Image: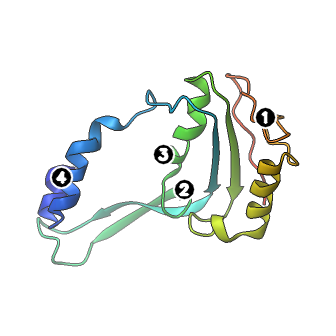
Amino acid sequence: VGELLRQAGASHSAQVWEEVRHLSGDSLAPNVSVLCLFGTDVPTLESVEWPGDSFDDPPSNATFATGDGTVLSASLEACPRWGLLQKQPVSVMRYKNISHSELVSQPAVFGEVLKLLGGQLETQDGSSNGRMRRRRRASPAPDVEA
């Protein structure tokens, strides 16, 4: 990835990649209580192909997969998996057909977060009163339908 970034003229990004690439993977759960909020089922760019070895020409093909319009589902699902890797609670709120950037501007999402912080909302894992409880390790969190 670092070499690809350098070829694309993004030497600073290549340097950052080299410095942080060892920090990826499920094994790096944060070991703190976590609330994961993200959109689902939005077409998200997965790959781009260029003809030849030059980025000067326009791409010849683009592939899309599911995600939140910015982040692919496989990466978004890393946060919920932390519940299997740590003792601290991990609560999940998924919003179908809401994009990455739309999430913070949706009144329903914002209202649910405020209710959760105020202890008035029960999350999918059954917690309330402003405290997140750890969900059972074997069961995936259900989706919130917006």
Residue 15, numbered circle: 4
Residue ranking furthest to the right: 120
Density class for disc 2 (Cα within 10 Å; few <14, some 14-19, many ≥20) is some
Of marks 2 and 4, the one in the foreground: 4
- Looking at marks 1 and 2 on the same chain, the residue that comes earlier in the sequence is marked by 2
Density class for disc 1 (Cα within 10 Å; few <14, some 14-19, many ≥20) is many
| Amino acid at pointer 4 | Gln
Q: Give the Cα separation between the discs numbered 3 and 4.
A: 22 Å
Residue where numbered disc 2 is placed: 66
Q: Give the Cα separation between the discs numbered 3 and 2.
A: 11 Å
Residue where numbered disc 1 is placed: 125
Q: Give the Cα separation between the discs numbered 2 and 4.
A: 29 Å
SS at mark 2 in the image: strand
- Looking at marks 4 and 1 on the same chain, the residue that comes earlier in the sequence is marked by 4
Q: Quadrant of residue 127?
A: top right
Is 144 positioned to the left or the right of 36 in the image?
A: right
Q: Position of residue 82 (x, y in %)?
A: 56, 31
Q: Give the Cα separation between the discs numbered 3 and 1.
A: 21 Å
Q: Position of residue 121 (x, y in %)?
A: 85, 48
- Looking at marks 3 and 4 on the same chain, the residue that comes earlier in the sequence is marked by 4
- Looking at marks 2 and 4 on the same chain, the residue that comes earlier in the sequence is marked by 4
Query: For this rendering, which residue is in front, 46 or 144?
Result: 144
Of marks 3 and 2, the one in the foreground: 3
- Looking at marks 3 and 2 on the same chain, the residue that comes earlier in the sequence is marked by 2
| Amino acid at pointer 1 | Asp
Residue at left offset 72%, top offset 37%: 141
Residue where numbered disc 3 is placed: 75
Residue 18, numbered circle: none
- Looking at marks 3 and 1 on the same chain, the residue that comes earlier in the sequence is marked by 3
Q: How is the image coloured?
A: rainbow
Of marks 1 and 2, the one in the foreground: 1
